[in-house]
Image (spheres, helix red, strand yellow):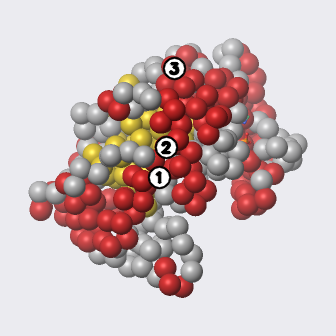
Amino acid sequence: MQYRRLGHAGIRVSALSLGSWVTYHNQVDTKSAVEMMAAAYDAGVNFFDNAEAYAGGKSEEVMGAALKTLGWPRLNYLVSTKFFWGLERGGEAVNRKDTLNRKYLLQAIDGSLARMGLEHIDFVYCHRPDPSTPVEETAQAMHDIIRQGKALYWGTSEWPADAVRAAWQIADRHGWHKPQMEQPQYHLFHRRRVETEYARLYEECGLGLTTWSPLASGLLSGKYRDGIPAGSRGALPNMAFLHEGLTHPARNAAVAALAPIAAELGGTLAQLAIAWATKNPRVSTVITGASQLAQLRSNLGALELAQRLTPEVMARIDALTAPLAD
Ligand SMILES: NC(=O)c1ccc[n+]([C@@H]2O[C@H](COP(=O)([O-])OP(=O)(O)OC[C@H]3O[C@@H](n4cnc5c(N)ncnc54)[C@H](OP(=O)(O)O)[C@@H]3O)[C@@H](O)[C@H]2O)c1
Protein backbone atom coordinates (compact mmCIF):
# COMPACT_ATOMS: atom_id res chain seq x y z
CA MET A 1 0.00 0.00 0.00
CA GLN A 2 1.06 3.59 -0.52
CA TYR A 3 0.10 6.35 1.89
CA ARG A 4 -0.45 9.91 0.78
CA ARG A 5 -0.89 13.15 2.67
CA LEU A 6 -4.38 14.59 2.68
CA GLY A 7 -3.36 17.75 0.84
CA HIS A 8 -1.13 19.78 3.16
CA ALA A 9 -2.42 18.03 6.31
CA GLY A 10 -0.17 15.73 8.30
CA ILE A 11 -2.58 12.79 8.16
CA ARG A 12 -1.80 10.08 5.61
CA VAL A 13 -4.48 8.07 3.86
CA SER A 14 -4.00 4.84 1.96
CA ALA A 15 -3.98 5.46 -1.81
CA LEU A 16 -6.89 3.01 -2.06
CA SER A 17 -9.78 3.18 0.38
CA LEU A 18 -13.18 1.50 0.69
CA GLY A 19 -16.64 3.08 0.71
CA SER A 20 -20.11 1.84 1.55
CA TRP A 21 -22.50 3.68 -0.80
CA VAL A 22 -25.19 1.38 -2.29
CA THR A 23 -23.50 -1.69 -0.85
CA TYR A 24 -23.73 -1.67 2.97
CA HIS A 25 -27.10 -2.89 4.23
CA ASN A 26 -28.46 -3.38 0.66
CA GLN A 27 -25.88 -5.79 -0.79
CA VAL A 28 -23.39 -6.25 2.05
CA ASP A 29 -24.52 -7.35 5.52
CA THR A 30 -22.43 -6.98 8.66
CA LYS A 31 -20.75 -10.38 8.23
CA SER A 32 -19.64 -9.52 4.68
CA ALA A 33 -18.63 -6.02 5.77
CA VAL A 34 -16.36 -7.58 8.40
CA GLU A 35 -14.76 -9.84 5.77
CA MET A 36 -14.31 -7.04 3.26
CA MET A 37 -13.02 -4.46 5.72
CA ALA A 38 -10.62 -7.05 7.14
CA ALA A 39 -9.32 -7.87 3.65
CA ALA A 40 -8.87 -4.17 2.91
CA TYR A 41 -7.15 -3.49 6.24
CA ASP A 42 -4.84 -6.48 5.74
CA ALA A 43 -3.86 -4.94 2.39
CA GLY A 44 -3.03 -1.65 4.15
CA VAL A 45 -6.28 0.28 3.59
CA ASN A 46 -6.70 2.74 6.46
CA PHE A 47 -9.74 4.76 5.34
CA PHE A 48 -13.39 3.65 5.23
CA ASP A 49 -15.91 6.08 3.76
CA ASN A 50 -19.53 6.46 4.80
CA ALA A 51 -22.36 9.00 4.90
CA GLU A 52 -25.42 9.66 7.02
CA ALA A 53 -27.65 9.26 3.97
CA TYR A 54 -26.31 5.87 2.82
CA ALA A 55 -29.15 3.34 3.26
CA GLY A 56 -30.91 5.87 5.47
CA GLY A 57 -28.36 5.56 8.29
CA LYS A 58 -28.12 1.74 8.07
CA SER A 59 -24.76 1.91 6.31
CA GLU A 60 -23.28 3.64 9.35
CA GLU A 61 -24.84 0.98 11.59
CA VAL A 62 -23.32 -1.84 9.51
CA MET A 63 -19.88 -0.22 9.51
CA GLY A 64 -20.13 0.50 13.23
CA ALA A 65 -21.04 -3.13 13.98
CA ALA A 66 -18.21 -4.33 11.74
CA LEU A 67 -15.69 -2.04 13.46
CA LYS A 68 -16.84 -3.35 16.82
CA THR A 69 -16.31 -6.94 15.69
CA LEU A 70 -12.95 -6.16 14.13
CA GLY A 71 -11.73 -4.38 17.26
CA TRP A 72 -8.84 -2.57 15.55
CA PRO A 73 -6.88 0.00 17.54
CA ARG A 74 -8.64 3.33 16.91
CA LEU A 75 -5.30 4.91 15.91
CA ASN A 76 -4.99 2.55 12.94
CA TYR A 77 -7.99 3.56 10.84
CA LEU A 78 -9.87 6.58 9.55
CA VAL A 79 -13.64 6.73 9.14
CA SER A 80 -15.78 9.38 7.52
CA THR A 81 -19.35 10.49 7.30
CA LYS A 82 -21.14 13.22 5.37
CA PHE A 83 -24.08 15.49 6.01
CA PHE A 84 -26.58 17.27 3.79
CA TRP A 85 -29.62 15.18 2.83
CA GLY A 86 -30.70 14.26 6.34
CA LEU A 87 -32.57 11.11 7.32
CA GLU A 88 -36.14 12.33 7.03
CA ARG A 89 -37.96 13.51 3.95
CA GLY A 90 -41.29 14.73 5.40
CA GLY A 91 -42.42 18.36 5.48
CA GLU A 92 -41.78 18.57 9.22
CA ALA A 93 -38.10 17.86 8.52
CA VAL A 94 -37.72 21.27 6.89
CA ASN A 95 -34.58 22.10 8.88
CA ARG A 96 -33.13 18.58 8.71
CA LYS A 97 -32.97 17.81 4.96
CA ASP A 98 -31.03 19.24 2.02
CA THR A 99 -29.28 21.68 4.30
CA LEU A 100 -26.01 22.63 5.99
CA ASN A 101 -27.57 24.80 8.68
CA ARG A 102 -25.95 24.90 12.11
CA LYS A 103 -28.78 23.13 13.98
CA TYR A 104 -28.84 20.21 11.56
CA LEU A 105 -25.06 19.77 11.47
CA LEU A 106 -24.57 19.89 15.25
CA GLN A 107 -27.27 17.25 15.74
CA ALA A 108 -26.34 15.11 12.74
CA ILE A 109 -22.84 14.42 14.07
CA ASP A 110 -24.31 12.96 17.28
CA GLY A 111 -26.54 10.62 15.25
CA SER A 112 -23.60 9.38 13.18
CA LEU A 113 -21.43 8.84 16.25
CA ALA A 114 -24.21 6.81 17.86
CA ARG A 115 -24.82 4.68 14.74
CA MET A 116 -21.09 4.04 14.28
CA GLY A 117 -20.48 3.49 18.00
CA LEU A 118 -17.47 5.82 17.88
CA GLU A 119 -16.29 8.71 20.03
CA HIS A 120 -15.04 10.66 17.06
CA ILE A 121 -15.19 10.50 13.28
CA ASP A 122 -11.99 11.34 11.42
CA PHE A 123 -13.34 13.06 8.32
CA VAL A 124 -16.71 14.82 8.13
CA TYR A 125 -17.91 16.24 4.84
CA CYS A 126 -20.59 18.66 3.74
CA HIS A 127 -22.04 16.24 1.20
CA ARG A 128 -23.28 18.91 -1.23
CA PRO A 129 -23.25 22.72 -1.25
CA ASP A 130 -26.25 24.49 0.31
CA PRO A 131 -26.67 27.89 -1.32
CA SER A 132 -29.45 28.78 1.14
CA THR A 133 -27.15 28.67 4.20
CA PRO A 134 -24.36 31.26 4.49
CA VAL A 135 -21.03 29.53 4.05
CA GLU A 136 -19.88 31.26 7.26
CA GLU A 137 -22.62 29.49 9.26
CA THR A 138 -21.62 26.11 7.83
CA ALA A 139 -17.87 26.67 8.26
CA GLN A 140 -18.32 27.73 11.88
CA ALA A 141 -20.56 24.73 12.64
CA MET A 142 -17.95 22.35 11.15
CA HIS A 143 -15.25 24.09 13.19
CA ASP A 144 -17.40 23.68 16.32
CA ILE A 145 -17.88 19.96 15.63
CA ILE A 146 -14.10 19.62 15.55
CA ARG A 147 -13.68 21.79 18.65
CA GLN A 148 -16.11 19.50 20.47
CA GLY A 149 -13.79 16.59 19.67
CA LYS A 150 -16.45 14.83 17.60
CA ALA A 151 -14.48 15.01 14.34
CA LEU A 152 -10.86 15.65 13.34
CA TYR A 153 -10.95 17.14 9.84
CA TRP A 154 -13.75 18.60 7.75
CA GLY A 155 -14.23 18.94 4.05
CA THR A 156 -16.72 19.23 1.23
CA SER A 157 -18.09 16.99 -1.48
CA GLU A 158 -18.93 18.25 -4.95
CA TRP A 159 -18.75 21.91 -4.02
CA PRO A 160 -17.88 24.41 -6.74
CA ALA A 161 -14.28 25.61 -6.42
CA ASP A 162 -15.40 29.14 -5.53
CA ALA A 163 -17.49 27.85 -2.63
CA VAL A 164 -14.60 25.74 -1.28
CA ARG A 165 -12.32 28.77 -1.49
CA ALA A 166 -14.88 31.01 0.23
CA ALA A 167 -15.24 28.52 3.11
CA TRP A 168 -11.47 28.20 3.40
CA GLN A 169 -10.96 31.99 3.45
CA ILE A 170 -13.67 32.61 6.05
CA ALA A 171 -12.24 29.89 8.29
CA ASP A 172 -8.73 31.25 7.78
CA ARG A 173 -9.85 34.79 8.68
CA HIS A 174 -11.54 33.61 11.90
CA GLY A 175 -8.86 31.11 12.91
CA TRP A 176 -11.34 28.23 12.51
CA HIS A 177 -10.48 24.74 11.32
CA LYS A 178 -10.36 25.05 7.54
CA PRO A 179 -11.82 22.60 5.01
CA GLN A 180 -9.03 20.11 4.35
CA MET A 181 -10.38 17.88 1.60
CA GLU A 182 -12.88 17.59 -1.22
CA GLN A 183 -14.66 14.42 -2.26
CA PRO A 184 -15.35 14.68 -5.99
CA GLN A 185 -16.27 12.09 -8.57
CA TYR A 186 -13.18 11.18 -10.59
CA HIS A 187 -12.73 8.53 -13.24
CA LEU A 188 -11.72 8.16 -16.87
CA PHE A 189 -15.03 9.66 -18.03
CA HIS A 190 -15.33 12.40 -15.39
CA ARG A 191 -12.29 14.62 -15.03
CA ARG A 192 -12.96 18.35 -15.39
CA ARG A 193 -13.56 19.27 -11.77
CA VAL A 194 -10.43 17.53 -10.44
CA GLU A 195 -8.12 18.41 -13.32
CA THR A 196 -9.28 21.96 -14.09
CA GLU A 197 -11.83 23.52 -11.76
CA TYR A 198 -10.01 22.72 -8.53
CA ALA A 199 -6.49 23.26 -9.92
CA ARG A 200 -5.73 26.44 -7.96
CA LEU A 201 -7.08 25.04 -4.67
CA TYR A 202 -4.40 22.39 -4.23
CA GLU A 203 -1.60 24.82 -3.40
CA GLU A 204 -3.64 27.87 -2.32
CA CYS A 205 -5.76 25.96 0.20
CA GLY A 206 -3.68 22.78 0.62
CA LEU A 207 -6.72 20.75 -0.36
CA GLY A 208 -6.54 16.95 -0.48
CA LEU A 209 -8.83 14.80 -2.61
CA THR A 210 -10.69 11.65 -1.63
CA THR A 211 -12.19 10.74 -4.99
CA TRP A 212 -15.26 8.57 -5.63
CA SER A 213 -16.62 6.08 -8.18
CA PRO A 214 -13.35 5.14 -9.90
CA LEU A 215 -15.30 2.58 -11.96
CA ALA A 216 -18.18 4.95 -12.79
CA SER A 217 -20.42 2.62 -10.73
CA GLY A 218 -19.08 -0.45 -12.57
CA LEU A 219 -19.11 0.82 -16.19
CA LEU A 220 -15.30 0.76 -16.31
CA SER A 221 -15.19 -2.89 -15.24
CA GLY A 222 -16.65 -3.73 -18.65
CA LYS A 223 -19.72 -5.51 -17.22
CA TYR A 224 -22.24 -3.23 -18.95
CA ARG A 225 -20.99 -3.73 -22.53
CA ASP A 226 -23.97 -5.94 -23.42
CA GLY A 227 -26.59 -4.26 -21.27
CA ILE A 228 -27.35 -4.47 -17.58
CA PRO A 229 -26.44 -7.87 -16.10
CA ALA A 230 -28.55 -9.43 -13.36
CA GLY A 231 -27.10 -8.94 -9.91
CA SER A 232 -25.25 -5.77 -10.84
CA ARG A 233 -25.69 -2.29 -9.34
CA GLY A 234 -27.49 -1.25 -12.50
CA ALA A 235 -30.11 -3.97 -11.91
CA LEU A 236 -30.98 -2.75 -8.41
CA PRO A 237 -34.51 -1.31 -8.32
CA ASN A 238 -33.51 2.10 -6.96
CA MET A 239 -30.54 2.57 -9.31
CA ALA A 240 -32.51 3.25 -12.50
CA PHE A 241 -31.05 6.76 -12.57
CA LEU A 242 -27.69 5.18 -13.47
CA HIS A 243 -28.97 3.25 -16.52
CA GLU A 244 -28.23 5.85 -19.16
CA GLY A 245 -24.66 6.34 -17.94
CA LEU A 246 -23.97 2.62 -17.51
CA THR A 247 -25.19 1.67 -20.99
CA HIS A 248 -23.67 4.69 -22.80
CA PRO A 249 -22.73 3.18 -26.21
CA ALA A 250 -19.61 5.26 -26.96
CA ARG A 251 -18.22 4.87 -23.45
CA ASN A 252 -18.84 1.11 -23.50
CA ALA A 253 -17.06 0.94 -26.86
CA ALA A 254 -14.11 2.79 -25.33
CA VAL A 255 -14.10 0.36 -22.39
CA ALA A 256 -14.00 -2.53 -24.89
CA ALA A 257 -11.01 -0.88 -26.55
CA LEU A 258 -9.27 -0.55 -23.16
CA ALA A 259 -9.56 -4.30 -22.54
CA PRO A 260 -6.49 -5.27 -24.63
CA ILE A 261 -4.41 -2.64 -22.78
CA ALA A 262 -5.46 -4.09 -19.43
CA ALA A 263 -4.62 -7.58 -20.71
CA GLU A 264 -1.20 -6.44 -21.99
CA LEU A 265 -0.46 -5.10 -18.51
CA GLY A 266 -1.56 -8.38 -16.96
CA GLY A 267 -4.56 -6.86 -15.17
CA THR A 268 -8.31 -6.39 -15.33
CA LEU A 269 -10.24 -3.42 -16.69
CA ALA A 270 -11.30 -2.48 -13.16
CA GLN A 271 -7.68 -2.50 -11.98
CA LEU A 272 -6.70 -0.34 -14.94
CA ALA A 273 -9.40 2.25 -14.21
CA ILE A 274 -8.60 2.41 -10.50
CA ALA A 275 -4.86 2.54 -11.22
CA TRP A 276 -5.41 5.44 -13.62
CA ALA A 277 -7.11 7.47 -10.89
CA THR A 278 -4.20 6.87 -8.50
CA LYS A 279 -1.75 8.28 -11.06
CA ASN A 280 -3.01 11.82 -10.41
CA PRO A 281 -0.73 13.13 -7.63
CA ARG A 282 -3.49 15.48 -6.38
CA VAL A 283 -5.57 12.45 -5.44
CA SER A 284 -4.93 11.52 -1.82
CA THR A 285 -7.05 8.37 -1.95
CA VAL A 286 -9.26 6.64 -4.49
CA ILE A 287 -12.39 5.43 -2.69
CA THR A 288 -13.32 2.10 -4.22
CA GLY A 289 -16.59 0.22 -3.84
CA ALA A 290 -17.33 -3.50 -3.96
CA SER A 291 -20.41 -5.65 -3.51
CA GLN A 292 -18.34 -8.84 -3.21
CA LEU A 293 -15.11 -9.83 -1.51
CA ALA A 294 -13.65 -11.15 -4.78
CA GLN A 295 -14.13 -7.75 -6.45
CA LEU A 296 -12.37 -6.01 -3.59
CA ARG A 297 -9.45 -8.46 -3.55
CA SER A 298 -8.98 -8.06 -7.27
CA ASN A 299 -9.34 -4.26 -7.24
CA LEU A 300 -6.68 -3.97 -4.54
CA GLY A 301 -4.24 -5.16 -7.23
CA ALA A 302 -4.64 -1.80 -8.95
CA LEU A 303 -1.62 -0.24 -7.24
CA GLU A 304 0.65 -2.91 -8.62
CA LEU A 305 -0.74 -2.38 -12.10
CA ALA A 306 -0.28 1.39 -11.68
CA GLN A 307 3.48 0.82 -11.71
CA ARG A 308 3.14 -0.36 -15.31
CA LEU A 309 1.18 2.71 -16.45
CA THR A 310 4.01 4.39 -18.32
CA PRO A 311 3.49 7.77 -20.02
CA GLU A 312 3.10 5.90 -23.29
CA VAL A 313 0.34 3.66 -21.88
CA MET A 314 -1.34 6.66 -20.20
CA ALA A 315 -1.40 8.40 -23.59
CA ARG A 316 -3.09 5.40 -25.20
CA ILE A 317 -5.70 5.31 -22.43
CA ASP A 318 -6.30 9.05 -22.75
CA ALA A 319 -6.71 8.85 -26.50
CA LEU A 320 -9.58 6.40 -26.01
CA THR A 321 -11.32 8.04 -23.06
CA ALA A 322 -10.52 11.77 -22.74
CA PRO A 323 -12.70 12.78 -25.71
CA LEU A 324 -15.68 11.12 -23.99
CA ALA A 325 -15.05 12.60 -20.54
CA ASP A 326 -17.04 15.31 -18.74
N1 LIG B 1 -19.33 11.97 -2.03
C1 LIG B 1 -20.21 11.46 -2.85
O1 LIG B 1 -21.15 12.14 -3.29
C2 LIG B 1 -20.08 10.04 -3.26
C3 LIG B 1 -20.87 9.52 -4.29
C4 LIG B 1 -20.70 8.19 -4.66
C5 LIG B 1 -19.77 7.40 -4.01
N2 LIG B 1 -19.04 7.94 -2.98
C6 LIG B 1 -18.06 7.11 -2.23
O2 LIG B 1 -17.19 6.42 -3.11
C7 LIG B 1 -17.29 5.03 -2.88
C8 LIG B 1 -17.03 4.29 -4.16
O3 LIG B 1 -18.03 4.65 -5.12
P1 LIG B 1 -18.66 3.53 -6.03
O4 LIG B 1 -19.18 2.40 -5.18
O5 LIG B 1 -19.60 4.20 -6.96
O6 LIG B 1 -17.32 3.03 -6.78
P2 LIG B 1 -17.13 2.32 -8.18
O7 LIG B 1 -15.78 1.68 -8.09
O8 LIG B 1 -17.36 3.26 -9.30
O9 LIG B 1 -18.28 1.22 -8.24
C9 LIG B 1 -18.26 0.14 -7.35
C10 LIG B 1 -19.24 -0.94 -7.83
O10 LIG B 1 -18.79 -1.47 -9.09
C11 LIG B 1 -18.94 -2.90 -9.08
N3 LIG B 1 -17.60 -3.48 -9.10
C12 LIG B 1 -16.55 -3.17 -8.27
N4 LIG B 1 -15.47 -3.90 -8.61
C13 LIG B 1 -15.81 -4.67 -9.66
C14 LIG B 1 -15.11 -5.61 -10.42
N5 LIG B 1 -13.83 -5.90 -10.19
N6 LIG B 1 -15.78 -6.22 -11.42
C15 LIG B 1 -17.07 -5.94 -11.69
N7 LIG B 1 -17.81 -5.05 -10.98
C16 LIG B 1 -17.17 -4.41 -9.96
C17 LIG B 1 -19.69 -3.23 -7.80
O11 LIG B 1 -21.10 -3.12 -8.04
P3 LIG B 1 -22.04 -4.39 -8.41
O12 LIG B 1 -21.28 -5.64 -8.12
O13 LIG B 1 -23.24 -4.22 -7.57
O14 LIG B 1 -22.34 -4.21 -9.86
C18 LIG B 1 -19.27 -2.11 -6.89
O15 LIG B 1 -20.14 -1.90 -5.81
C19 LIG B 1 -18.69 4.84 -2.29
O16 LIG B 1 -18.82 3.65 -1.57
C20 LIG B 1 -18.78 6.05 -1.40
O17 LIG B 1 -18.07 5.81 -0.20
C21 LIG B 1 -19.17 9.23 -2.61
Q: Are marks 1 and 3 in contact (CB under 8 Å)?
A: no
Query: Which numbered circle lies on residue 43?
Result: 3
Q: Are marks 1 and 2 in contact (CB under 8 Å)?
A: yes
Q: Earlier in the sequence, mark 1 or mark 3?
A: 3
Q: Earlier in the sequence, mark 2 or mark 3?
A: 3
Q: Are marks 2 and 3 in contact (CB under 8 Å)?
A: no
Residue occupying the point 70% across, 33% down: 292
Whether residue 246 sits left or right of residue 319 in the image: it is right
SS assignment at label 3 = loop
Query: What's under tag 1, amino acid-wise?
Result: Arg
Residue occupying the point 53% across, 49% down: 61
> Where in the figure is residue 277, as x and y percent of width and height?
52, 34
Label 2 and label 3: CA atoms lie apart by: 20 Å
Q: In terms of image quarters, where does ligand 1 lie?
A: top right
Read off the residue under disc 2. 64
Residue 325 visible, this orientation: no
Mark 3 packing: few (<14 Cα in 10 Å), some, or many (20+)?
some
> Where in the figure is residue 164, as x and y percent of width and height?
32, 59
Query: Which numbered circle lies on residue 115?
Result: 1
Q: Earlier in the sequence, mark 1 or mark 2?
A: 2
Q: Compared with residue 40, is residue 128 higher up or lower down, i.e. above or below?
A: below
Towards the viewer: 127 or 76:
76
SS assignment at label 1 = helix
Total marks drawn?
A: 3
- The mark closer to the camera, 2 or 3, is 2
Towards the viewer: 49 or 284:
49
> Where in the figure is residue 109, as x and y percent of width and height?
37, 58
Query: What's under tag 2, amino acid-wise?
Result: Gly
Query: What's under tag 3, amino acid-wise?
Result: Ala
Residue occupying the point 29% across, 75% down: 134
Q: Compared with residue 178, is residue 8 higher up or lower down, i.e. above or below?
A: above
